[in-house]
Amino acid sequence: MDRPEFLLIRGSSRSNAAACLAMALFALLALIGCGRRDSVPTIRILWAEWHPSDALAELGREYQAKTGVRVQVIQKSWDGAFGDAVFAEFRNRDDHYDIIIGDSQWLGLGAVGGHYVELTDWIKENIVTDRLEPAAMKWYCEYPKGSARYYAVPCEADVMAWIYRKDLFQDPAHKSAFAAFLAKEKVTPAFPLAPPATWEQLRLIARYFKQAIPGMAGLVMPTSRNYDMATMGFEPVLWSFGGDFGDYATEKVTIGSPATVEALKFYTDLLSSSSAGGRNMGYGEVAAEYISGRAAMACNFMAFFPTFTNPGENPDYYDKTGFFNSPGHQGADGTFRRAAALGGQGMSINAHISPERQARAKEFLKWFSQSATQADWAAKGGFTSDKTVLAGETFRKAAPYNPLFEEAFQLMRDFWSVPEYDDLLKTCQREFCAVSQDGADAETAVKQVQAEQEAILAKRRRDR
Amino acid sequence: MSAVRALSDRSVRNLCVMPALGLLILFNVFPLLASFALSFTDFNPIIDTKPVFTGLANYAGLLDSPRQEVWRAFSRTGAMVAVTVGLETILGFCVALLLRRAFKGRGLFTAILLIPMMLSPAVMGSFWRYLFNVDYGLVDWLLDARLAWDGSRPLSFWAVVIAEVWMWTPFMMLLSLAGLNAIPKTLYEAAEVDRAGNWFRFRHITLPLAAPMVILGVVFRAMDGFRLFDTAMVLNGNLEGQPTTFVSVLLHARGFGGSRSLGEPAALAYLLLIASLALASLVLRYLDHVRARRGASGFTGRGA
């Protein structure tokens, strides 16, 4: 019996030999590539693609020079790739990364899912927590809130604040025109054209610039339906107006209050002074709008602020930009409230790596948390939680926005950080945007959020 | 060698097919069934809860989603399919009409035109991302404007349209060309004898006889368009509630986001599958109808 027809190889023996040789060479190269092992001990850190990651990579080179341990900072973009990478690591229980610098809201997911190493005892022995801002330990490291159990050390402290065009605010023509605008609007008491102290002042200033300069937005702020942007943009208004998401210790939802409705209506009205696309704008778009000269004021996380003072990135207004913290609001009860949305991340150790790698990661965390390293971190553009560094003249003078930071720490508050944070966030994003972008009724939307969030947390209690 | 000789053609064929079949079952059929089962559960692998059977709750939740998020994604996807497939068909057919004529270098020209189709959508998306960049992109430079083609801007939808049309017009061109080349020359000769005009020949010979291949292309592209993911993801990321949040992007955002159950995205995937199959079935029925009508008129397109 002959060999089946299709097994017979046709063609000259020389070309067959060449093909076999090429395949063998390819296989050999592939094997060599697979077999390569890096002999240098390495700490792989997963973080977002932004300025602070570059600063951390720079700091990592110093760590390598000192200890011989290489530090690789793997940066993933904010447009979803960062979250995808973190959640893929969690979901697959992978050990690609030694350290994960995850968003503060993800803390519960990392802790409850068993993806972050609990550092409570280790922190007691290795980190001088008295030196750190208590707000940073609470929001970036502690889960559940108030439990004194820690899963991270503070890395990039961040908070939402405002930037404004100093050249416009200081222009005498605008100052007098603004006074006339207030008189026409019958605003009493009148106030000067300066960084606003209250949300009402901010609204009036934004309206003035929107009317006074054609093509200019009075303000731009994060309002996008994507991820957490609209919710983060709304948070300072919500808290200032006396509203709240809920009690994080008892997990009682309180978002459905009249204060939230009032805040949401105010926030929607505020956006009428924004740019054409201002009702659906992401963090990067807010920055781009300001840099292009089309906005008098912009709200963003402070981690983006180095962009605004960099002549390369903001060539027209880098020296004409001023900064202020979130304004406040006096409620019907007479209480003046002021708050700012917390950003930033803590540094956690991946629980799925070997004990040897965990020990190496802990050494890095210890080094990173030292005061000297924190001073270096701040000098490179990172935002530290170290009180001694924050209070130092070097830090205050290092960047024009740095003096705001110490005050901002006292204002910062955060969203839920329970494992169900994503479901809770999505209800807020959907309903707040329905009001601010599509004109839905604020009261109905807020009631919907309350009902859905209560159901989500009730299910959480049942599952536990 | 003797062992090989002892095998019949049939046995060898089975030996070759079995591993491929095994892999197909392992990587295609099993996940298909597993995800179908998952679509009836509440299961979050991140916090490692056990799957809980929830019946049709995931499907009901999606079809009655608050603020019609899912329907919005479907209508966005439908709009994208209609615009891209429409443009690809018109452009592809026009280019095929030009390529049908003999000219020097036609083969090379056709090969060059096919390049976009051969690129990976992710690679192609990365190219276009650079071209659309607001700071250093070629598109804004050519338009002498600072247009943002990404994020939440309406232009981000059109950025995906442009990239998709650029990539898939060659595919429609190829099928149209195949359809056009199958038209017997004798029909044109007969039309010439009858002194039929160009428009008449195009309307009554070219278009109806090339139509089956073109419609086949439309079916393939429409089905492909409904699961559009890679180009949108590379160009505009994993964004929710944006002009580029097509069903597949929404599915990815829901399935691979933070704490959501995998059950809901699995149900969404099956809704997408049903929508694609329904669309394909409609178009194929139409194709059969066209064939039957032509058969009844004794016009086979296979030459006189």
Image: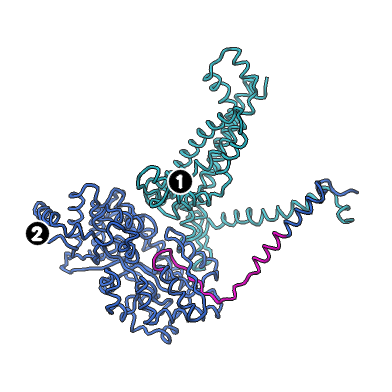
Q: Is residue A35 magenta?
A: yes
Q: Secondary structure at mark 1?
A: helix
Q: Percent position (x, y) of residue A116?
A: 48, 74
Q: Residue furthest bottom?
A: A125
Drawing shade for chain B: cyan
What residue lies at 68% left-to-right and 63% top-to-bottom?
A: A29
Quarter-of-image position of residue A286: bottom left
What residue lies at 36% left-to-right and 62% top-to-bottom?
A: A453
Residue A124 vertical position relative to residue B32 in the rendered view, above or below:
below
Look at mark 2 in the image and give the residue it sits on.
Answer: A188
Quarter-of-image position of residue A132: bottom left
* Residue type, label 1: Val
Q: Nearer the viewer, residue A452 or B196?
A: B196
Q: Quadrant of the C terminus of chain B?
A: top right
**Which of the two discs, 2 and 1, sits closer to the camera?**
1
* Residue type, label 2: Thr
Residue A359 vertical position relative to residue A299 in the rendered view, above or below:
below
> Left or right: A446 with respect to B227?
left
Drawing shade for chain A: blue
Q: How many marks?
A: 2
> Left or right: A165 with respect to B139?
left
**Rendered image coloring scheme:** by chain
